Image: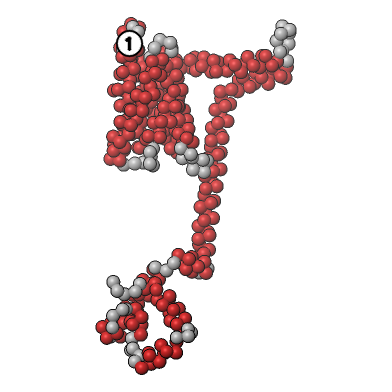
């Protein structure tokens, strides 16, 4: 177009004022006074002759209104910011909105911190309170009659060293009393902790941490992985053990990393999507999208782990515990794949 952009109007006016104050203003004024155009505005905006751009008053008013609207829409951001700053109510609204967002972030930070702190303290107490009480009693009452080479420090170190083994033995005693529930809780803790570590790995902080996502992952472990794996491990030990043949471990690993992994990963993604309130169509689409990446990741991680899992080196009641300890690392990978770009 040969029409000058509307944003140049103010610039042209400034140039006109500068021109009138310049040394050549007198000669230009004499020339313009001989034939003053009737439509000076159109002459400044067009390179065509005046008689071709003249319009009736109604068309001129419509064009002026349209150009003013375009000029307001294309003004520099600094002008809009200045207008917003001087508008009073608008500036107060912006500040109030920023304050509200900051307050919400602070609330999330303190809420997440309180929840995480409560869970950590509760878990540590449940796992260590017996040994901690023993240490306090040791320091308060002393050793009593003891060999010369025995000290409080050596006894305390012995208690702390035995802590992991004592926990494993306590777990092994509890599982036979209610195997499905115990294994469901074990997998729920493993999946929730794995998702939590996954978010930390992705750079989340207490202000951005998605704890509901971790709880959904833990619920998927409690509902799906624990109970189903109990029956799956029992099935393999019954029908795929082949009287303890050494090559039976390879068959178990192959079955677990093909048919069972496809089913288990699909179940995990389905439960995660359902608990998140997504539509069934979206859930099934997500299951199809994550199936191959999750299975491919499993083949990179689990063959060596399951060589130990499905051997006779791990007792039947501790197999799921061993798997879930490894599951913390695996769920970190699986959760990252299942929540990609969400």
Question: Relative to 156, is 294 on the left or the right?
Answer: left
Placement of 318 over or under 13, stated as above or below:
above
> In which quadrant of the rendered view does residue 288 lie?
top left
Q: Position of residue 229 (x, y in %)?
A: 37, 21
Classed neighbour count for the residue bearing mark 1: other residues with Cα under 10 Å, few (<14), some (14–19), many (≥20): some
Q: Quadrant of the N terminus?
A: bottom left
Whether residue 164 is visible: yes
Task: Tell which of 305 and 28 is nearer to you.
Answer: 28
Q: Nearer the viewer, residue 153 or 32?
A: 32
Q: Position of residue 271 (x, y in %)?
A: 35, 33
Residue 159 as seen in the image, left or right of residue 2: right
Reading the image, the residue beneath label 1 is 248
- Quadrant of the image for the C terminus? top left
Q: Please state the horizontal and vertical placement of residue 126, each as a whole percent of the image.
A: 56, 25
Q: Is residue 219 visible?
A: no
Outermost residue toward the left in this view: 52
Which residue is drawn at the image coordinates 54% and 51% (left, top)?
103
Please report the residue visible at 30 percent of the width from the left and 22 percent of the height from the top.
258
Which residue is painted at 40% across and 16% down in the image?
309
Q: Is residue 117 above or below residue 68?
A: above
Q: How many numbered marks appear?
A: 1
């Amino acid at each position: 177009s040969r029409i000058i952009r509307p944003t140049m109007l103010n610039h042209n006016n400034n140039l006109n004022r500068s021109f009138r104050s310049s040394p050549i203003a007198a000669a230009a004024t004499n020339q313009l006074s001989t034939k003053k155009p009737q439509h000076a505005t159109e002459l400044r905006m067009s390179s065509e002759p005046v008689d071709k751009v003249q319009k009736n008053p109604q068309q001129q008013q419509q064009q002026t209104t349209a150009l003013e609207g375009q000029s307001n829409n294309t003004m520099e951001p600094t002008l809009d910011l200045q207008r917003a700053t001087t508008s009073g109510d608008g500036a107060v609204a912006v500040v109030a909105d920023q304050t509200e967002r900051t307050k919400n972030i602070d609330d999330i930070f303190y809420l997440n911190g309180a929840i995480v702190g409560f869970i950590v303290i509760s878990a540590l107490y449940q796992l260590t309170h017996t040994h901690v009480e023993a240490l306090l009693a040791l320091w308060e009452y002393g050793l009593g009659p003891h060999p010369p080479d025995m000290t409080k420090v050596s006894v305390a170190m012995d208690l702390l060293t035995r802590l992991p083994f004592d926990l494993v033995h306590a777990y092994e005693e509890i599982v036979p009393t209610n195997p499905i529930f115990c294994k469901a809780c074990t997998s729920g803790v493993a999946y929730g902790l794995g998702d939590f570590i996954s978010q930390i790995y992705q750079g989340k902080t207490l202000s951005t941490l998605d704890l509901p996502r971790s709880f959904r992952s833990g619920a998927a472990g409690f509902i799906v992985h624990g109970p189903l794996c109990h029956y799956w491990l029992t099935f393999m030990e019954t029908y795929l053990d082949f009287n303890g043949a050494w090559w039976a471990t390879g068959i178990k690993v192959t079955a677990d990393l093909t048919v069972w992994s496809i089913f288990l990963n699909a179940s995990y993604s389905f439960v995660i999507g359902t608990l998140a309130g997504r539509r069934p169509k979206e859930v099934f689409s997500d299951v199809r999208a994550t199936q191959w990446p999750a299975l491919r990741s499993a083949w990179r991680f689990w063959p060596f782990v399951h060589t130990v899992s499905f051997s006779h080196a791990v007792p039947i009641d501790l197999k799921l515990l061993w798997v879930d300890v490894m599951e913390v690392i695996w769920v970190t990978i699986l959760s990252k794949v299942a929540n990609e770009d969400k």
